[in-house]
Image (cartoon, rainbow, N blue to C red):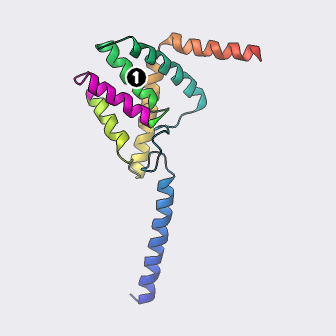
Amino acid sequence: MSRRTVLSLALLMLIAGGFEGCTTMSQPGSSTTLPSSAFFPVETSELKLLQAIAYAQDTRMKNCHKGPACEEAYYTRGLVALFENRADAITVFQELHTAMPNNRYDAATTGWLNLLQDPAPSSVHSKALMIQLKQEVLHNLLERSDLTTVKSVKDHDRRVAELK
């Protein structure tokens, strides 16, 4: 190859690498994601339901010491925090792992901690898996949530709309 061709290819690779770096930096879950941002973005309508679940779990966590109900409250609260604040999710999962080291969610908790603390891979396959994981967690949280919690949020929204 001629020297000019080699220089052109090197320049092209440098430019392509620069674009890849810029797009990677703006991707959610990349190593530049702020710890105060959500691990999984969520729609506002879903966020209201998740906040109601979070409130219920916070109440349960305050009133429990150990045991299956407490384990579930911490684990569910950690899952909800994935949609609110990455650092809070890490804190809740670490509390569960430390306070109840052999709990039934320990393997999942350790997995979440590893995932949350490592920079997210940027491959297309990994992004597709993250989207699928987000949908699965969201579906399970909303399905598991107490129907009275969901109903109370809808009732509250209805009352607010009536007042307007």
Screen quadrant of the C terminus: top right
Magenta: main secondary structure: helix
Magenta stretch contains residue 103: yes
Q: Position of residue 86 (x, y in %)?
A: 44, 36
Label 1 SS: helix
Q: Residue at x 37, y 21 (%)?
A: 74
**Which residue is outermost to the right?**
164
Q: Amino acid at mark 1?
A: Thr
Of 132 and 94, the residue lying toward us: 94
Screen quadrant of the N terminus: bottom left
Residue located beneath label 1 in the image: 76
Above/below status of 23 relative to 102: below
Q: Residue at x 35, y 29 (%)?
A: 93
Of 98 and 49, the residue lying toward us: 98
Magenta stretch contains residue 133: no
What is the crowding at mark 1: few (fewer than 14 residues within 10 Å), some, or many (at least 20)? many
**Left or right, 94 with reference to 56:** left
Q: Position of residue 91 (x, y in %)?
A: 38, 31
Q: Position of residue 33 (x, y in %)?
A: 47, 46
